């Protein structure tokens, strides 16, 4: 399979191209600005599955009114540390950001903040929201449901989504620790990225329409849970927290991302924010996290590895490298971004 040519684009220029394309499709500027932030957050860390490769999809869904472009947001605090945020089916990036701000405020005031986010569109790389809290000194967990594209362990037909989990914690110095994973071997966006670059994929990622492993990204019919029954259990947990708990569709009933782009998706997300100061000495906590990172770096590397990294550290290194070289995206996507085509 012949690989597509890559174009290297400076970060701020790429962000402006994102925002331009989103507003061109009629997304309100405030929402477009936050969505562009999340997309560049992904691309600049090498998480291309949630960056520029998604733009044409977002633009088409916006144009076909698959997002509510005039939403009425509503936050309902149901307890000292608990609340729900209704996104009124607006673009998920903006909705999840606003909901996380509410969770952070509750954690600052009472030690814990938990917000269930209802009725939203796709929200991109959810590590952004966990880091949002960590940059304010909080520990955070966020989970989000998605539409059925994963075969349950032992099954042949999709039931759950990739249902990601993200965790972040601040430390005394340096960027927060950030862990963001799909509960599948790889996210669906990795399949899209491989398609855009005409690259093959490992045969452990997905199966074809016959339920057989495939290396051709264009033949993928369903993804596989990470670590078999363990990933399967995690994706069920996420679906319960971000779906059933909030009275939203679950499992195979979650609206497809791609089938009808004029239909609202009604997705759910769940934020948990913890204020370290309510559980002990905050400074000591930050020191311990920093000490953990330092000790991990001191662990002797196994054969074939340069060193031991803390979760998210490789993405930080990629970000620093891209500052110098620019962010690589497929040439066809770049041509679309600079064009006047909506989608």
Image: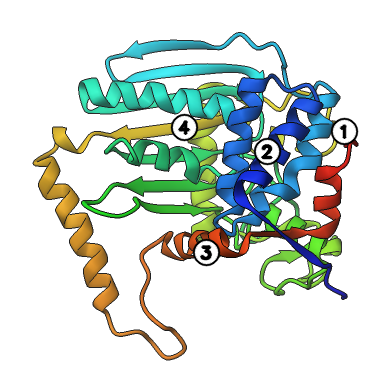
**On the image, numbered disc 2 is attached to which residue?**
16
The quadrant of the picture occupied by the N terminus is bottom right
Q: Is residue 291 left or right of residue 247?
A: left
Mark 4 or mark 2: which comes first in sequence? 2
Residue 163 visible, this angle: no
In this view, the residue in front, 36 or 164, is 36
In percent of width and height, residue 146 lies at 64, 40
Identify which residue is drawn at 86% across, 24% down: 64
Mark 2 or mark 3: which comes first in sequence? 2
Frontmost of labels 2 and 3 is 2
**On the image, numbered disc 4 is attached to which residue?**
270
Secondary structure at badge 1 equals loop
Residue 43 visible, this angle: yes
In percent of width and height, residue 213 lies at 76, 71
Identify which residue is drawn at 83% across, 44% down: 338
Asked if marks 2 and 1 touch (Cβ < 8 Å), the reply is: no
**On the image, numbered disc 1 is attached to which residue?**
342
Mark 1 or mark 4: which comes first in sequence? 4
Identify which residue is drawn at 68% across, 66% down: 205
**On the image, numbered disc 3 is attached to which residue?**
318
The residues tagged by marks 4 and 3 sit, at their Cα atoms, a distance apart of 28 Å
Secondary structure at badge 2 equals helix
The residues tagged by marks 1 and 3 sit, at their Cα atoms, a distance apart of 30 Å
Is disc 1 surrounded by few (<14), some (14 to 19) or many (20+) residues within 10 Å? some
Secondary structure at badge 3 equals helix
**Image coloring type:** rainbow
The quadrant of the picture occupied by the C terminus is top right
Mark 1 or mark 3: which comes first in sequence? 3
Is disc 3 surrounded by few (<14), some (14 to 19) or many (20+) residues within 10 Å? some
The residues tagged by marks 2 and 3 sit, at their Cα atoms, a distance apart of 21 Å
């Amino acid at each position: 399979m012949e690989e597509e040519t890559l174009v290297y684009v400076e970060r701020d220029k790429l962000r402006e191209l994102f925002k331009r394309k989103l507003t061109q499709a009629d997304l309100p500027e405030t929402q477009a600005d936050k969505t562009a932030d999340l997309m560049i957050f992904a691309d600049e860390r090498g998480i291309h599955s949630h960056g520029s490769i998604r733009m044409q999809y977002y633009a088409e869904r916006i144009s076909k009114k698959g997002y509510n472009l005039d939403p009425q947001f509503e936050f309902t605090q149901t307890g000292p540390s608990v609340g729900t945020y209704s996104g009124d089916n607006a673009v998920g990036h903006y909705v999840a950001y606003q909901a996380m701000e509410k969770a952070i405020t509750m954690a600052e005031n009472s030690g814990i903040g938990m917000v269930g986010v209802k009725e939203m569109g796709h929200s991109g790389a959810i590590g952004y929201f966990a880091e949002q809290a960590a940059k304010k000194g909080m520990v955070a967990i966020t989970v989000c449901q998605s539409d059925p594209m994963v075969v349950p362990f032992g099954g042949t037909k999709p039931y759950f989504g990739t249902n990601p989990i993200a965790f972040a914690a601040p430390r005394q110095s340096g960027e927060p620790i950030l862990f963001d994973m799909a509960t599948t071997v790889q996210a669906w966006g990795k399949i899209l990225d491989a398609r855009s670059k005409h690259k093959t994929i490992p045969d452990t990622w997905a199966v074809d329409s016959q339920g057989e492993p495939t290396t051709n990204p264009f033949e993928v019919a369903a993804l596989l849970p990470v670590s078999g029954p363990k990933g399967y259990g995690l994706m069920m947990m996420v679906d319960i927290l971000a779906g059933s708990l909030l009275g939203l569709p679950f499992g195979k009933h979650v609206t497809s991302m791609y089938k009808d782009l004029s239909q609202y998706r009604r997705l759910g997300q769940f934020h948990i924010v913890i204020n370290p100061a309510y559980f002990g000495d905050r400074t000591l906590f930050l020191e311990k996290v920093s000490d953990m990172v330092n000790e991990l770096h001191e662990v002797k590397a196994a054969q074939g590895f340069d060193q031991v990294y803390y979760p998210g550290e490789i993405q930080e290194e990629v970000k620093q490298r891209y500052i110098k070289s620019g962010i690589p995206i497929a040439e066809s996507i770049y041509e679309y971004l600079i064009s006047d085509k909506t989608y």
